[in-house]
């Protein structure tokens, strides 16, 4: 028996519904690191779109990462049927659906493209959370943090344009 508070359970149901609406699938969350990376980036985009989950992020190996969100993702995956059943009874408000659509637009509906998600969210974090606004400095810092993506200038510029045009 778990000791999850009712407010925490409600938050996790809202989280499950929101990521499901974006198209995220929890089926292999525990076994598949890529699903966990996608989950982190999708929730980051949802929070960026003003859906209040209150997860704190820091930069980590694959970009913005929230340890408490990781814990919640594992909890949802281990108790999938509870959240799946609950989601069928939940409905999004119009504003909630608009915010989810904003997150989808920000992600460009590329939720299974890990290099894109890492590039986009890392550059967004550097730009909006760290405050690096000068393009040359931002790109330089990104390449320093993500040398594995440094040779794809097209994706870096696309991500920067997406961030600057989507604020």
Image (cartoon, rainbow, N blue to C red):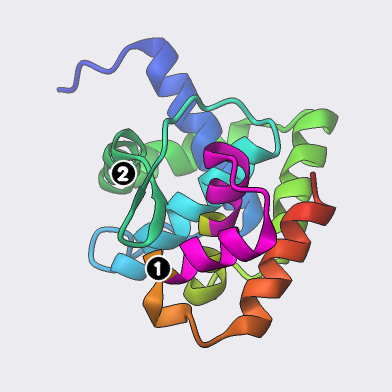
Kindly identify the residue that appears in the image at 15 percent across and 22 percent down.
1
Residue topped by disc 2? 70
Residue 132 highlighted magenta (yes or no): yes
Corner quadrant of residue 9: top left
Camera-side residue of 54 and 89: 54
Name the element at disc 2. helix
**Marks 2 and 1, how far apart in space?**
25 Å
Kindly identify the residue that appears in the image at 28 percent across and 18 percent down.
4
Label ID, residue 144: 1
From the viewer's perspective, tell me whether residue 16 is left or right of residue 60: right
From the viewer's perspective, tell me whether residue 47 is left or right of residue 145: right
Q: x, y percentage for residue 80?
A: 36, 46
Kindly identify the residue that appears in the image at 43 percent across and 38 percent down.
83
Camera-side residue of 93 and 118: 118
Q: Which residues are magenta?
A: 123-143
**Label 1: how many residues lie within 10 Å, few (<14), some (14-19) or many (20+)?**
few
Q: Residue furthest bottom?
A: 151
Residue 77 highlighted magenta (yes or no): no
Name the element at disc 1. helix
Kindly identify the residue that appears in the image at 36 percent across and 40 percent down.
66
Q: x, y percentage for residue 123?
A: 57, 58
Q: x, y percentage for residue 27?
A: 37, 62
């Amino acid at each position: 028996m778990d000791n999850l508070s009712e407010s925490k359970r409600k938050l996790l149901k809202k989280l499950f519904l929101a990521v499901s609406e974006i198209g995220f699938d929890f089926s292999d969350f525990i076994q598949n690191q890529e699903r966990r990376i996608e989950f982190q980036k999708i929730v980051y985009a949802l929070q960026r779109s003003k859906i209040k989950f209150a997860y704190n992020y820091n930069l980590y190996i694959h970009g913005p990462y929230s340890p408490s969100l990781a814990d919640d993702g594992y909890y949802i995956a281990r108790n999938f049927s509870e959240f799946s059943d609950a989601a069928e009874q939940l409905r999004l408000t119009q504003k909630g659906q608009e915010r989810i659509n904003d997150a989808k637009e920000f992600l460009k509906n590329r939720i299974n493209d890990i290099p894109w998600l890492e590039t986009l969210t890392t550059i967004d974090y550097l730009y909006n959370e760290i405050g690096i606004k000068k393009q040359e400095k931002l790109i330089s810092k990104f390449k320093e943090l993500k040398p594995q993506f440094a040779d794809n200038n097209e994706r870096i510029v696309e991500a920067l344009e997406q961030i600057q045009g989507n604020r």
